[in-house]
Amino acid sequence: MIVGVVGMTHLGLVSAAGFCAKGFETLCFDPDAALIDRIVAGDLPILEPGLAELIANNHSRQRYSADPADLGRCDVVYIALDVVTDDRGCSDLSGVHSLIDAVVPHLSASAVLVVLCQVPPGFTRSLDVDPARLYYQVETLVFGQAIERATQPERYIVGCADPGQPLPNAYCTLLEAFECPILPMRYESAELAKISINMCLVASISVANTMAELCEEVGAVWPEIVPALKLDRRIGAYSYLNAGLGIAGGNLERDLATVIRLAAEYGTDAGVIEACVANSRHRRDWAVQTLRKHVLANGGDPLVAVWGLAYKQDTHSVKNSPSLATLAQLPEVRVRLHDPVVLAEMAGHPRSEAAESPLAAARDADALMILTPWAEYRSIAPRDIAATMAGRIILDPYQVIDAETARAAGLIHYRLGAPMVPPDSG
């Protein structure tokens, strides 16, 4: 059996590697021949921990092509293009339509076509493809954790024209190889299931951020509370309860926008979703508000070091990055920037300079903001930070630095979900 994966963006590359790792011969197709040549040469266009190693281990089973005719040998073909969104969270589906139109004429009469891209309800049923061979599958891509989720999925949600009919043999064989539950349902149910999952994540994030903000004021510590919640069966061990600088990355924002748009179209209520959007915007500005109150209010022309520009660790993506949103509100402030993979120019800040290392960014800085929790930042000793900086204030929303160690180093430590930790007076 041969699996075809169409679209060599993040979703396509990771999905193809996951199928191949299970022993299936996999053909990776993209109409961009230059992109295919780049990938074959080992220059991956994305950052994803473990992906290069997995592809190398797959050896010759994972092949590449820019010729759609090669897909004619495939038994199951996935459309796996990343769907881009605009600043309002609206999806641009033109690329998905173009790929489908380009590859369908080359598929064998028995091949199954699976749309893996995230699309709004109604998209799959609207396609001019035989419904007996057309399916929609909910993608589970999470930047930084994509390999684990591609090779060890929790479940497969499959949209069908008729969920009462058995899945085609080839498609069923592929899914069953991953030994997880398979949930067939109507196209529209599967499309909305992905959005529903993300809405539950958004609700958890909003609760975490709301309560974490109260912790900062009343003397409680949010990470101390989280284990109690995760031991409650109604909430669960895997609940997404980390406080953060709002919602970022693009995917959750897209689903928020989709629910609000559909509610307006059909006259349903989306007040709770609109409240989540408002809460996200409020918490996104935590770093700006804290910096203005405790650093900029003192006057002068302070230098602020910033560690992290990506929207989260282990990705090069800056889509709706809280770090960039923070910097955009501080055009008058001198900043020195560092990120392991994102260039400082991406911030577009008028008074910024790049630093080659985290400590180089912190040199003589009046304050430090750690806005992306990269692992390499966790390995830097607070005493080294204190020895490098001119000031003592650290804004550390994700608690990259241990609070007590920061206190012992003489640092003033601000974090999400907990009161400020003053320096050790001794």
Image (cartoon, rainbow, N blue to C red):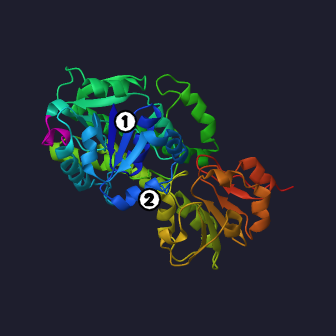
Magenta stretch holds residue 126: yes
Rendering coords of residue 250 (x, y %):
38, 52
Q: Which residue is mark 1?
A: 197
Rendering coords of residue 282 (x, y %):
45, 55
Callout 2, which amino acid?
Arg
Rendering coords of residue 260 (x, y %):
26, 47
Which element carries disc 1, helix, strand or loop?
Answer: helix
Q: Nearer the viewer, mark 2 or mark 1?
A: 2
Direction from residue 218 to residue 165 in the image, left or right: left
Q: Image height check: is 264 above or below 136?
A: below
Q: Image height check: is 19 above or below 319?
A: above
Tell me where the magenta segment starts and ends, as one range: 122-130
Q: Spatial distance from mark 2 to mark 1, Cα to Cα? A: 35 Å
Q: Quadrant of the C terminus?
A: bottom right
Magenta stretch holds residue 44: no
Q: Residue at x 76, y 48 (%)?
A: 404
In which quadrant of the rendered view does residue 281 lie? bottom left
Q: Residues within 10 Å of mark 2 (few under 14, many from 20)?
A: few
Direction from residue 257 to residue 406 in the image, left or right: right
Task: Give the total of numbered labels.
Answer: 2
> Any mark on residue 259, and which?
none
Direction from residue 6 to residue 311 in the image, left or right: right
Q: Residue at x 25, y 31 (%)?
A: 159
Q: Nearer the viewer, residue 398 or 26?
A: 26
Q: Residues within 10 Å of mark 1 (few under 14, many from 20)?
A: few
Q: Residue at x 51, y 68 (%)?
A: 327
Q: Which residue is mark 2?
A: 38
